[in-house]
Image (cartoon, grey):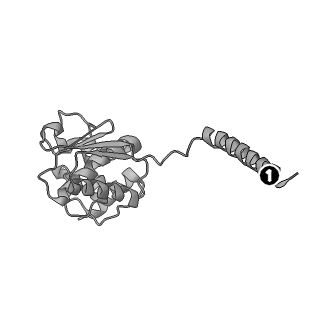
Amino acid sequence: MDTATRTRSSRIALFLCLIVSAAILGSQRPAPALEQPLTVHGATAAEEGAIDWALRRYRIAGLDGMPNLEVFLHRSDEACNGGIGLYYAGRIDLCTKDASEPYQRKFALHEMAHAWTEANVDARFMDVRGIAAWNDRSFDWKERGTEQVAEIITSGLGAGEIAPLLPDQITDPIADRELADLFELLTGRRPITQID
C-alpha cells in the first residue's frame, strides 16, 4: 500500500471513529445538574444575602430534608396578609423591605422552618407541649403549634439577636436548656447557637 492510500485509509478510519463516537456520545444525556432547593424572586442584594445566610444555617446545623422552595420578596405587606412572612406549599412570601438585617434573617429562617417542619416533624411536639391546635387561625398566633415550632427552630439556628416569640407561659421565663431541648426534640440535633 502506498503512502497516499494509507493516508486516505487513516482519514476514513478517523472519520468513522468520529461518527461512531458522536453517535454514542450524542445519545447520552449529560448528568443532571444538582437541583437547587431555593429560587428567589424580586430580592434586593441585602434580602438575597439574608436568605442565603438562612439556608446556610440549616446546612451548618445538618438539617437536611429542606423541600424545594420558591421565595418571593415584596415591597408591600399585602402579599403576606399584612404580616412580614408567609409560607404555603413550597412558597415563601417575605415582606421585609423595611426590616433590619437581623429581622430579614430571622423571618427567612422562620418561614423556612415552616417548610422544613412540614417535611420532617411529626406530632410528638404537640403532645409534649400540650398544644391544642397545629394551625387553627382561631387561636392566637403564638398559641399555634406551627408557629411555636418555627420560632424554636429559628432560635436554634439564628445568631441570638432576636428572642423567639412564644406564649407568655412558655417564656416566663423559658430556660435556655428548655429551648435547646425542644429544638433537639424537633430536629434530632442540638442548636448551633446559644439561645438567650
Q: Mark 1 highlights which residue?
A: 4
Would residue 122 be seen by someone viewing this image from the given angle?
no
Residue extending farthest right: 1
Query: Which quarter of the rendered picture does the C terminus lie within?
Result: bottom left
Q: Quadrant of residue 80?
A: top left
Image check: 103 left or right of 36? left
Task: Please tell me whether residue 188 is drawn above or below residue 76 in the rendered image.
Answer: below
Front residue (pair 141, 26): 26
Residue 119, given in percent of the width and then of the height, sits at 40, 42
Going 48% across and 47% down the picture, which residue do you hit? 33
Instruction: Choose top left, top right, bottom left or bottom right for residue 58.
Output: bottom left
Count of numbered marks: 1
Where residue 106 appears, as percent x and y from the top left, is 23, 55
Residue at position x 36%, y 40% in the image: 118
In the rendered image, residue 10, in percent from the top left (x then y), is placed at: 77, 50
Q: In front here: 62 or 5?
A: 5
Which residue is found at the position 29% from the left and 46% from the top? 40
Q: Is residue 69 left or right of residue 30?
A: left
Disc 1 marks a residue whose amino acid type is: Ala
- In the structure shown, which secondary structural element does the residue marked by tag 1 occupy? helix
Q: Nearer the viewer, residue 31 or 176?
A: 31
Q: In terms of depth relative to the viewer, which is nearer, 103 or 153?
A: 103
Q: Is residue 119 above or below residue 53?
A: above
Q: Is residue 54 visible?
A: yes
Residue at x 39% of width, y 52% of height: 187
Q: Residues within 10 Å of mark 1 (few under 14, many from 20)?
A: few
Residue 122 is situated, as x and y percent measured from the top left of the image, at 39, 42
